[in-house]
Amino acid sequence: MSEETVTGPNGALEATHPLALAPVTGPASNVDGFVRQFLRNLNYERGVPLSASSPNDQYFAFAMTVRDYLMARWLEDLRRQRVTQSKSVCYLSAEYLLGRQLDNNLLASGLTDIATEAMAQCGIDIEELRAQEVEPGLGNGGLGRLAACFIDSLATMSVPNIGYGIRYEYGIFRQTFVDGQQVEQPDAWLELGSPWEFPHPEFAQTISFGGHTETYDDEGVTRSRWVPSWNVRAVPYNYMVPGYLNGRVNTLRLWSAQATNSFDLRVFNSGDYEEAVRAQTYAENISKVLYPEDSTPQGKELRLQQQYFFVAASIHDFLDHMVADDFGLENLADRVIFQLNDTHPVIAVPELMRVLVDEKKLEWDAAWAITQKCFAYTCHTLLPEALEVWSVELLGRLLPRHLEIIYRINEEFLLEVRERFGDDEIRLRDMSIIGEFPERSVRMAYLATVAGAKVNGVAELHSQLLRDKVLPDFNEFFPGKFTNVTNGITPRRFIRLANPELSELITSALGTGWLTDLERLRGLESYAEDPDFRAAFREVKAANKRVLSDVLRARDGFEVSDGHMLDVMVKRLHEYKRQMLKLLHIVTVYEGIVSGRVDAASVQPRTFIFGAKAAPGYAMAKRIIHLINAVGSVVNADERVQGRLKVLFPQNYNVTLAERLIPAADLSEQISLAGKEASGTGNMKFALNGALTIGTDDGANVEIRQLVGDDNFFLFGMAEPEVEALWARGYKPAEFYQHDESLRRAMDLIASGAFSGGDRSVFEPVVSNLLYDDRFMVLADYASYIEAQAKVDAAHADEDAWTRSAILNVARCGFFSSDRSMRDYIDRIWHTPPAF
Ligand code: 26W
């Protein structure tokens, strides 16, 4: 099709015009219709003709065209959600790690083929458009990505849902390496704007902070109220969340902070212009940047501001727009469940109480009964240091009324505990929502547990440890409150989009339908015995490696060697995840070859790929990144290994890169110390893409191994009870070092300065930390890990057997669809059936 001449509409529509009442319909669902709408968007929305448009203009116009097709359904679903009485899931999450939207929205709307042909007709390379999209990195890792998978599944299952969160202006930092060391750069993902968001300033909420509380007489009743001292405007931005080919479009609503006029005015009237501008900046800081700390809360004031900002806006948004004025609030739980994604949104609990008691003037007990039915809490960690607490001083200063409410909740809760268990002061101290040491503070996980209708862990083992080790008193006090929902991943993004070749192979065997009913992958079991299918499966893996190789060459200048096993460890850098254990294995193999004890020719060729960001303030994690890069440069340059070992560490691991790495991987590294990784979800993505796992008995690895079978999983290391027992005996890592020659050689090589140009001081802290502290028992699991890696080598030598195992991993992991996770939440916690 040639470029059209631009013609404008003939005059504007009157609001009363009959056409204004007609339902919105999308462009025609054919190539011509797509092209026409695309050119229209290019002309009218971007203000450029095709001939003068940049790739970014074209990307925007393209994305807008996809949007236009989804719009009619979205408007209709928004309307129905408002007017019907169905129950909604309000997912409250400080993080959504969405990944790129374009391909997902094309897939969901069934437009991929039409759009591809349309771009071809316009002479545009669709790959170039794809490359324009900056992924919104509004999350740190597993917890944020899980939220994104869940909202995809809810839309696909037609369950009414609003995902509420924060529209950070800067997402997770961009990682670069300078001399092998991590340097963080701001992620200005909105620099060029985003075609996927719809601001709605008319639905802004005013969110207050600070000030004091007072009591007053309300027709004979003494009531409390909050007199805040400052406020900000929370402006909602809506994002489409389309279900997969079901015509459903749910909403993700992210809040952005703006200064309020009233606040500015007050300061302006005082004549202090500079102060007024400062105030504006202060307000807008609230949604400025995602905290890059993963699992170590810093107790920073701005973070508490972020948390209250987004949950208060969300609760008010839901009550204002989704609940009719005459609705009896005692039945609120029939309309909504607020799911608390970890402790970050838990300040929502006293906020709902404040609304019900102070604003709606309900009795305390009635309000508490409602609140206890409207919240449920998911815990995502086992690390004690990751359980958030807020100092009473800070909370009282920022949210004085909420602190009073928390005190009252605690008082009444402890009364009940006393009734049940007597004056057991130790137990009362241990269960108090207010902790006293090292300073008086609010334990947010306890508050969530007391308030939530249900509390869930994210894998069987994790939920069991939550009940037995983290919150045992609460489990005893609230029988039936604790439950498990094992995490899952969306197969649309992580199989269909990330691995189109495998998807096609699966469809050729099983037909369609498996993408929304992932247990059907079971049907592949018999194909594992079919040599032709195995050959085709291997060809898919090889093709994915070629794609990865192109991506890594273009993005990082790396060369991926042909014929290598790809051994991949991608996740946040954290000591408990034990990237150091992986590194000790690499150094062991390398040392064996260069010392001449091992013949290089006998070593299975392997490329080790790492992807990991370290929290900017986490010194040890950053040192480990430096060490991985240092080992990589030495190993990759050493001719003695004859290209048999390679270590690659692409910078800035993110969702987009994950989608390339996972389908190409042969071996998935899931090697946390048992009892530390709540679930893991990368483990599921790898298994479903036909990588075999080497892993500990931790998190969801346990369930993966149960499903795929011992023969198709490389288990190593201590189980959680053994870890406990070793701690109890007194763990002395240096003893492992002394008694294991291979471990000693590897550690000595690092300590010798071999990877730091002879400077022994650079990695000394890493080595001595392992020798004298080793909180995550790297040395204790080393021997077992090395042994398991030898089994990996042996298994990989038998190509057919390996492929059979890989196919069985795919066939048996259908359980890990996030659709199944959603069904579990719905059945056990939310009770929200599909609607309209
Ligand atoms: C700064 C405070 C803080 C504390 C905890 C930030 C982030 C966290 C999260 C709980 C960290 C996180 O992402 N946890 C991961 O959640 C995944 C989804 O359930 C699990 O698969 C991972 O095992 C868990 O580490």
Image (cartoon, rainbow, N blue to C red):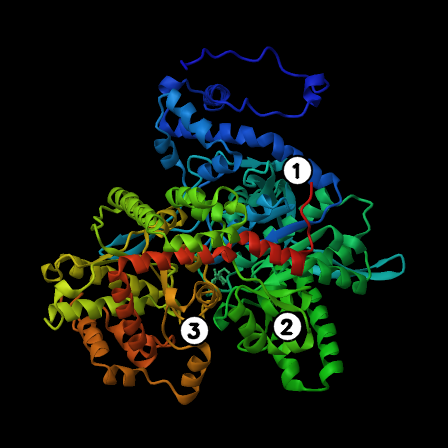
**Disc 3 crowd, CA 10 A, few/some/many (<14, 14-19, 20+):** many
Ranked by sequence position, the earlier of labels 2 and 3 is 2
Q: Nearer the viewer, residue 554 or 660?
A: 660
Residue 671, given in percent of the width and then of the height, sits at: 37, 68
Q: Tell me if I can see residue 670 in this picture.
A: no
Q: Distance between the residues labelled 1 and 2?
A: 38 Å
Which quadrant would residue 823 be assigned to in this image?
Answer: bottom right
Q: Residues within 10 Å of mark 2 (few under 14, many from 20)?
A: many
Q: Residue at x 24, y 85 (%)?
A: 739
Q: Is residue 216 above or below residue 194?
A: below
- Cα–Cα gap, marks 2 and 3: 28 Å
The reply to whether residue 163 is in sight is yes
Q: Quadrant of the N terminus?
A: top left
Residue at the disc numbered 3: 674
Position of residue 9 relative to residue 419, above or below, is above
Residue at (64, 46) in percent of width and height: 159
Q: Relative to the observer, which residue lies in front, 808 or 692?
A: 808
Q: What element carries label 2?
A: loop
Return the residue at label 2: 433
